Amino acid sequence: MKLNDNVNYIVSGLERSGTSMLMQILHAGGLPMAFDHSSRPPDDDNPRGYFELEGGKIISRLMDQTFPLENYKGKFIKITAYGLKFLPPGRYKIIYSQRNIEEILDSMEKMAKIKDTERDDTRIVFTKLNTMIIQLIDDIEDADVLHVNYNAIVAEPEENIKNIREFLDAEDIDFEKMLSVVDKKLYRKRRI
Amino acid sequence: MDKEFTDIPIPTALVKQIEEKIESSDIASVQDFVVKVLKENLPASDAPAEGLSQEEEDKVKERLKALGYMD
């Protein structure tokens, strides 16, 4: 399975919105990916791994324009939502994940080992960030964006993974393996 | 969290200059002009994200640091 070498492929969404699961799905399908498990190995918060580059800390490198995006053309990489604000001009294909905001906040608190005493403010801020980034990527002239929803993927994996296959125009993708990634047992933060 | 604007005094003479300059442009107000010029002159990484106040942006960064996504 080959992707276009002139395009940067990105999986994104707010942190804890299902971006790692999406990366796992794409990896299982045989798509070219770039990630390393060494800097942030799998743990209880992401038992199958984070599928990130540089331990997920590429946002700072995007901000100071030192992240070599051109080296990752033709491969999927994960850049969480805030990092998309700093994308340089270019051709992009982005799969953007959304998830129930309460589940995101629950999962963030668990991962950061905090009890958020300002949760109402945090909800407002991350909801705004999500809206802002969606607007931003939808407005990029040379970007194709597929919006997906973590909760919907877990509930209806077949239909949603078909949408991903169509978006990538990838008939030779391993659909069954992609489906097998969606493990409802790992869906531990259900709110709806 | 709810205050998204602040007041900064600008010399009256400068405001008059801006009013004259924008008269024949599509810029609707002195405020729009000032915001436009500031955005053009701030590096993207330092400017608050569109729609987020500086305080909100700081809250995002603080949370991303707690989650290990930023140093």
Image (spheres, coloured by chain):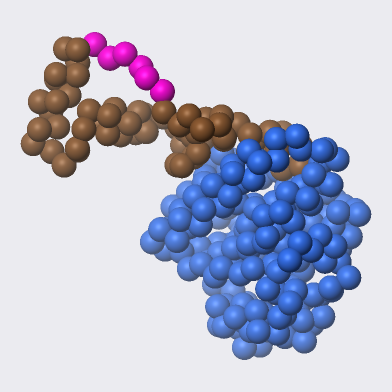
Relative vertical location of residue B36 with respect to residue B16 in this rendering, above or below: below
* Above or below for A94 versus B17: below
Q: Point out the image quarter for the C terminus of chain A.
A: bottom right
Q: Is residue A12 above or below residue A128?
A: below
Q: What's drawn in magenta, residue-wise?
A: B6-11
Please state if B18 lies on the left or on the right of B38 as rendered: left
Q: Quadrant of the N terminus of chain A?
A: bottom right
Question: Can residue B49 be seen in this snapshot?
Answer: yes
Q: Is residue A114 magenta?
A: no
Q: Nearer the viewer, residue A56 or B3?
A: B3
Residue A87, horizontal then vertical, whole percent: 51, 49
Q: Give x and y (percent) for residue A145.
A: 51, 67
Q: Main secondary structure of the magenta part?
A: loop
Query: How many marks can you see?
Result: 0
The colour one sees for chain A in the rendered image is blue
Q: Observer-nearest residue: B9 or A176? A: B9
A184 to the left or right of A104: right
> Residue drawn 54% across and 70% down?
A146
Spot occupied by residue B42 in the image (x, y as percentages of width and height) = 41, 29
Give the residue drawn at x 19%, y 12%. B12
Instruction: Supply the letter of whichever chain is brown.
Output: B
Residue B10 drawn in magenta: yes
What residue is shown at x 59% (from left), y 63% (from top)?
A96
Q: Is residue B71 left or right of residue A126?
A: right
Q: What x and y, as percent, mark residue A122?
A: 65, 41
Is residue A11 among what the camera can see?
Answer: no
